[in-house]
Image (tube, coloured by chain):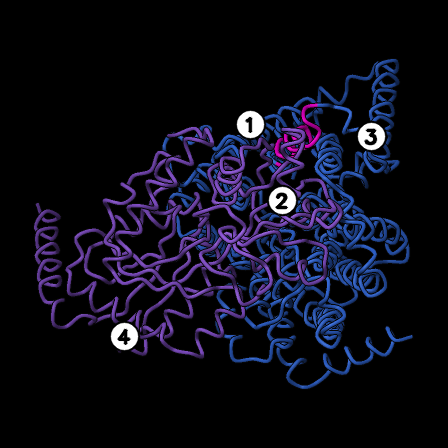
C-alpha cells in the first residue's frame, strides 16, 4: 500500500506548476527535435543540460526526459510524410507510413502513430510503476550469451523486413554486417578498415548511415525522378484522420504486441529502442496472414513499431534509475545529468528518493498526455508541409540533416559520409535493394560480435555457455523453432513452385515507380 | 594568389595575436575541449573548472565536448590548434600517451602539448561482486594463485587504465587472470554485479551506489591516498602493493609552443580556482579528488607516468599502431 502513497506523492510533484511547465517545454522541444531529420534527442538534451543547472533536480530531469521521449513522437512525422526519418527508429515507420502518404492517407497514418505511441508509452509506464525492482533484477540475469542469442534472433528477423526479394534482403544484411566491422576492435584494440581516419575509429555512426540511406537517398531520388511525388491534395479534416471501426480493429493487437516487445527489449541495458522497433515490425510481418501488404501502407506496419519504440524508451529508464546502469549514450547522459544535480541513481534511489523517482515516472505519463494533446492538432500543420514546393522543402531538409549529423561529433567528415551513403542509398533504391535490413545488420553485427567473443571469454572458450544457462536455453529453442518454421515455409513454397518472389522485385521495391 | 595573400595576412595576424597575447591575454573567450562525453566525471571537472577560470580570467571559458576515438578526436583538434592559449585540452593519460601509442593518430603524444596544470583525479577502486564471497585482497590473490586463469577481470578496453591496473596487480602478485574488455564502465559494472566477471578496477563514481548497497565489495583504492567517500577502504599501497598509483587523472594542456607567460597565467587561474572550498566539496561529493600540480611538476609527472604506463602496455601485450 505504501507504493500507492508513493505514486500519489509522485503525481502531486509532477502536477505542481513548475514540473508541469518544464514537462511541457521538454516534450515540445522533443517533438520538434524529433521532426527535424538527423537532429537527435542527444544533441538537444546536451544543449539543454546547462540550462537545467538552475532548476530543482526533479524538474530538471522531468524536462530532459521529456525531450527524450518527446522526440520519439515527433520522429515519425517526417518519415511518414516525406520518407525522411527524423530518428533511426522512425526509419521503420517510413516503410509503411510513406506509402500511406502516397495513397493520400497521411492524416490517418499520423493519427495512428500518435495513438500507438501514447498507448505504448503509457503501458510501459504502468509496467514500470509495478515492476521496476523485478525488471531490474531480471535484467541482471541477461549476460553476453543471452544477448548474443537475442541479436541472432533479430538478425534472422532482419532478412524478412524488406519487401521483395529475400536474396536481396540477405545481401543487404551481409553488407550491413560488413560496414559494422569498421572501427576499433574491442578485444584487441586493433583498428579495422579505418584507413588511418581518426573519425572512423569508433566505427561509422548509426545516425550517419540511417540519414544517408533513408533521408538523403530519398531527396536525391526525388531529384532524379521528379514524377515520383505528387503534391498533397485535399484538406485534412479531423474526420479524415480518424480510423474507421475496421481500422481500429486492425491496430489493436499489433499495438499491444509492439508494446510488449518494446518494454522487454528496452529494459535490457544496451539493446535499446532501435532494435525493439525493428523486431516489432519483423514480428508483425511474420505473423501476418497477408505479409505482402507490408511495405505498401499496412496499418500494422506503423502501429507495432511506433508502440514498440515509445514503450522501449520508457522502459529504458528502468535499468538507468534502478541499477544506475545506462542502456545507451542518451541514458548515460541523463544519468550524468542526475549526478551533476547531486542525485545518484542506483539500487537505493527508489528507497532514498521516492519523491523524485515517482515524480519522474508520473511526469512521464503526464508528458505522454501532453504529447497527445500537442501532436493531434499539429497533424494538420505537418500535413500542410507537403504543399510546400519540394525545391524549397528538400534543401531545407538536407540542411537539417547536415546540421544533425555534424552535431553528433562536430565532424565535417560525417557530413561527407552522410552524402556518400545518400548516393549509395539512391543506387540501392533504383536497383530495388531494401535499406532496412542493411541498417539492422549494421546495428546488430558489432553487438553480436562483442557478445559472442565475451561469452566465449567467460566460458574460457567453451561453447556450452550458450545452452547451460536457463534463459539462453529458452532463446536457443525459440531460434531453432523459428528456423524450422521458415525452413518449412520455404519447402512448401518450393513445392508450390511459385518463383514469383524472385521475379518481381521491381514491383515491390521502395521505388515510387508504380505511382 | 589571392588565397595565398589571405593566408599570409592571416598568419601575420596570428603572429601579432600571439605577440600581443603576453600582456592582453585573454582578450577573447577560451575553449576548453573535453575529450569525453557530457555527463561523466571529466565533464563535471571541466565545467566546474571553467566556471572558476571564467571568474578569474575575465573572459568566458567555454567547455566543448568532442568525444570519440578514445580521446584522439579532441587531442588531434587541440594539438593542431594555434598555440595562443585560446584552445585548451582536458588532458589525461589516453590523450597524452596511451591513444597515440595504440592508434595511428596525427599528433605526437607528449611533444605536441604544453602542460599547464594537473587538476584532479578520480580513484580507481578494485571491486568484486558480493556473490564471489571475497572480502580482502589477500583472499583474492590466494584464489588467483591457487588456480591460474580461472578468475576474470573486466576493463573498459584493451590498453585502458582499468586493464593496465589489473595487469599491474597480476605483475605485483605474480598471478594470472583472464581479461574481458567492455565498451564502457556501465556494462562492465553489470557483469561484475551479476557475477559473470570476478573483479574490476573501475572509476569510483559509477561503483558508489553498488558499494553502498553491498552488491559490490571494495578491496582496495588504487590512488595515492584514501578517498573520503570510502574512508574505511585501504589504498593498494597500504595493502602492501608498493607504488600502486592507478587513478584516472585529469589536467589541462595547451598546444605545444604556447607562450610561457600565457601558460603561467592559466596555471595561476587554475591554482586559485582549486583553492575554492565550496568547489572542492562539490567535486569530492561526486567522487573526484583534488590533485593540483603546477606546470613544472605536471610536466615531470607526465614524463614519468608515460614511461611507467608504456611499460605496462608492453607487459599487457597490447598491439601498437
Which chain's colour is purple?
B
In terms of depth relative to the viewer, which is nearer, B222 or A185?
Answer: B222
Q: Position of residue B181 (x, y in %)?
A: 57, 38
Q: CA separation, marks 3 and 4?
A: 62 Å
Q: Which residue, given by chain and number where applicable, does mark 1 sit on?
A: A178
Q: CA separation, marks 2 and 3?
A: 32 Å
Q: Which quadrant: the N terminus of chain B?
A: top left
> Start and end of the magenta stretch?
A447-461
Q: Position of residue A261 (x, y in %)?
A: 80, 47
Badge 2: few (under 14), some or many (20 or more) residues near its Cα, within 10 Å? few
From the viewer's perspective, is the residue at label 2 or at label 4 nearer?
2
* Residue located at (37% from left, 37% from top): B310
Q: CA separation, marks 2 and 4?
A: 52 Å
Tag 1's secondary structure? Answer: helix
Which of the marked residues, 2 or 4, is nearer the chain's N terminus? 4
* Residue located at (67% from left, 36% from top): B143
Task: Report whether B281 appears left or right of B268.
Answer: right
Q: Which residue, given by chain and number where applicable, does mark 2 sit on?
A: B138
From the viewer's perspective, is the residue at label 4 or at label 1 nearer?
4
Q: Tell whether position A439 is magenta.
A: no
Q: Which residue, given by chain and number where applicable, does mark 3 sit on?
A: A468
Write down the chain letter for disc 4: B
Q: Which quadrant: the C terminus of chain B?
A: top left
Tag 4's secondary structure? Answer: loop
Amino acid at each position: 500500500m505504501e507504493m500507492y502513497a508513493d505514486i500519489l506523492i509522485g503525481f502531486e510533484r509532477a502536477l505542481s506548476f513548475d514540473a508541469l511547465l518544464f514537462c511541457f517545454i521538454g516534450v515540445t522541444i522533443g517533438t520538434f527535435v524529433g521532426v527535424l531529420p538527423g537532429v537527435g534527442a542527444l544533441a538537444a538534451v546536451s544543449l539543454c543540460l546547462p540550462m537545467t543547472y538552475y532548476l530543482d533536480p526533479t524538474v530538471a530531469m522531468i524536462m530532459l526526459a521529456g525531450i527524450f521521449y518527446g522526440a520519439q513522437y515527433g520522429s515519425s512525422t517526417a518519415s511518414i510524410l516525406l520518407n525522411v526519418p527524423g530518428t533511426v527508429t522512425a526509419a521503420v515507420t517510413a516503410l509503411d507510413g510513406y506509402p500511406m502518404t502516397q495513397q493520400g492517407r497521411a492524416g490517418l497514418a499520423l493519427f495512428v502513430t500518435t495513438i500507438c505511441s501514447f498507448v505504448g508509452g503509457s503501458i510501459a509506464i504502468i509496467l514500470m510503476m509495478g515492476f521496476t525492482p523485478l525488471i531490474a533484477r531480471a535484467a541482471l540475469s541477461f549476460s553476453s550469451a543471452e544477448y548474443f542469442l537475442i541479436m541472432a534472433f533479430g538478425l534472422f528477423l532482419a532478412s524478412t523486413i524488406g519487401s521483395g526479394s529475400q536474396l536481396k534482403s540477405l545481401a543487404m544484411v551481409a553488407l550491413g554486417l560488413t560496414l559494422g566491422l569498421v572501427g576499433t576492435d574491442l578485444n584487441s584494440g586493433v583498428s579495422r578498415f579505418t584507413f588511418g581516419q581518426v573519425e572512423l575509429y569508433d566505427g561509422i555512426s548509426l545516425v550517419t548511415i540511417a540519414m544517408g540511406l533513408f533521408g538523403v537517398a530519398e531527396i536525391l531520388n526525388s531529384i532524379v525522378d521528379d514524377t515520383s511525388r505528387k503534391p498533397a491534395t485535399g484538406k485534412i479534416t479531423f474526420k479524415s484522420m480518424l480510423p474507421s471501426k475496421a481500422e481500429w480493429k486492425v491496430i489493436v493487437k499489433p499495438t499491444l504486441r509492439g508494446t510488449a516487445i518494446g518494454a522487454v527489449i528496452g529494459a535490457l541495458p544496451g539493446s535499446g529502442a532501435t532494435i525493439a522497433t525493428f523486431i516489432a515490425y519483423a514480428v508483425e510481418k511474420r505473423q501476418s496472414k497477408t505479409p505482402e501488404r507490408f511495405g505498401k501502407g499496412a496499418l500494422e506496419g506503423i502501429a507495432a513499431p511506433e508502440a514498440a519504440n515509445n514503450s522501449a524508451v520508457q522502459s529504458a529508464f528502468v535499468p538507468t534509475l534502478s541499477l544506475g546502469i545506462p542502456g545507451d549514450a542518451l541514458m548515460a547522459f541523463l544519468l550524468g545529468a542526475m549526478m551533476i544535480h547531486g542525485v545518484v541513481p542506483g539500487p537505493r534511489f527508489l528507497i532514498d528518493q521516492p519523491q523524485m523517482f515517482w515524480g519522474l515516472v508520473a511526469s512521464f505519463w503526464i508528458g505522454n498526455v501532453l504529447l497527445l494533446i500537442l501532436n493531434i492538432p499539429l497533424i494538420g500543420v505537418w500535413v500542410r508541409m507537403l504543399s510546400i514546393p519540394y525545391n524549397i522543402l528538400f534543401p531545407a531538409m538536407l540542411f537539417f540533416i547536415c546540421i544533425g549529423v555534424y552535431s553528433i561529433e562536430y565532424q565535417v567528415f560525417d557530413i561527407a559520409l552522410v552524402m556518400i551513403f545518400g548516393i549509395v542509398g539512391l543506387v540501392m533504391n533504383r536497383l530495388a535493394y531494401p535499406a532496412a535490413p542493411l541498417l539492422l545488420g549494421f546495428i546488430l553485427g558489432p553487438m553480436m560480435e562483442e557478445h559472442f567473443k565475451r561469452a566465449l571469454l567467460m566460458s574460457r572458450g567453451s561453447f556450452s555457455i550458450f545452452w547451460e544457462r536457463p534463459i539462453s536455453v529458452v532463446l536457443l529453442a525459440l531460434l531453432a523453432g523459428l528456423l524450422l518454421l521458415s525452413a518449412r515455409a520455404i519447402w512448401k513454397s518450393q513445392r508450390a513452385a511459385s518463383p514469383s518472389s524472385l521475379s518481381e522485385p521491381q514491383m515491390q521495391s521502395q521505388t515510387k515507380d508504380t505511382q | 594568389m589571392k588565397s595565398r595573400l589571405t593566408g599570409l595576412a592571416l598568419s601575420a595576424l596570428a603572429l601579432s595575436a600571439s605577440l600581443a597575447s603576453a600582456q592582453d591575454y585573454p582578450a577573447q573567450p577560451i575553449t576548453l575541449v573535453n575529450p569525453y562525453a557530457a555527463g561523466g566525471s571529466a565533464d563535471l571537472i571541466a565545467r566546474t573548472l571553467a566556471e572558476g577560470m571564467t571568474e578569474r580570467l575575465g573572459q568566458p571559458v567555454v567547455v566543448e565536448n568532442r568525444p570519440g576515438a578514445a580521446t584522439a578526436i579532441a587531442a588531434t583538434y587541440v594539438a593542431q590548434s594555434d598555440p595562443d592559449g585560446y584552445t585548451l585540452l582536458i588532458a589525461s593519460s589516453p590523450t597524452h600517451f596511451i591513444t597515440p601509442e595504440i592508434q595511428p593518430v596525427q599528433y605526437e603524444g607528449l611533444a605536441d602539448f604544453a602542460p599547464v596544470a594537473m587538476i584532479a583525479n578520480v580513484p580507481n577502486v578494485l571491486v568484486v561482486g558480493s556473490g564471489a564471497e571475497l572480502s580482502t585482497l589477500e583472499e583474492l590473490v590466494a584464489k588467483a594463485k591457487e588456480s591460474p586463469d580461472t578468475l576474470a577481470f573486466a576493463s573498459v578496453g584493451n590498453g585502458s587504465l582499468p586493464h593496465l591496473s589489473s595487469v599491474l596487480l597480476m605483475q605485483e602478485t605474480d598471478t594470472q587472470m583472464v581479461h574481458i574488455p567492455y565498451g564502457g564502465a556501465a556494462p562492465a559494472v553489470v557483469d561484475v554485479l551479476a557475477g559473470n566477471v570476478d573483479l574490476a578496477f573501475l572509476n569510483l563514481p559509477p561503483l558508489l551506489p553498488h558499494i553502498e548497497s553491498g552488491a559490490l565489495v571494495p578491496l582496495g583504492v588504487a590512488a595515492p591516498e584514501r578517498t573520503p567517500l570510502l574512508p574505511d577502504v585501504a589504498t593498494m599501497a597500504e595493502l602492501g602493493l608498493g607504488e600502486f598509483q592507478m587513478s584516472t587523472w585529469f589536467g589541462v594542456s595547451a598546444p605545444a609552443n604556447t607562450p610561457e607567460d600565457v601558460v603561467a597565467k592559466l596555471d595561476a587561474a587554475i591554482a586559485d580556482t582549486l583553492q575554492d572550498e565550496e568547489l572542492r566539496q562539490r567535486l569530492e561529493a561526486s567522487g573526484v579528488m583534488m590533485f593540483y600540480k603546477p606546470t613544472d611538476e605536471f610536466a615531470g609527472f607526465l614524463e614519468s607516468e608515460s614511461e611507467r604506463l608504456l611499460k605496462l602496455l608492453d607487459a599487457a601485450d597490447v598491439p601498437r599502431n
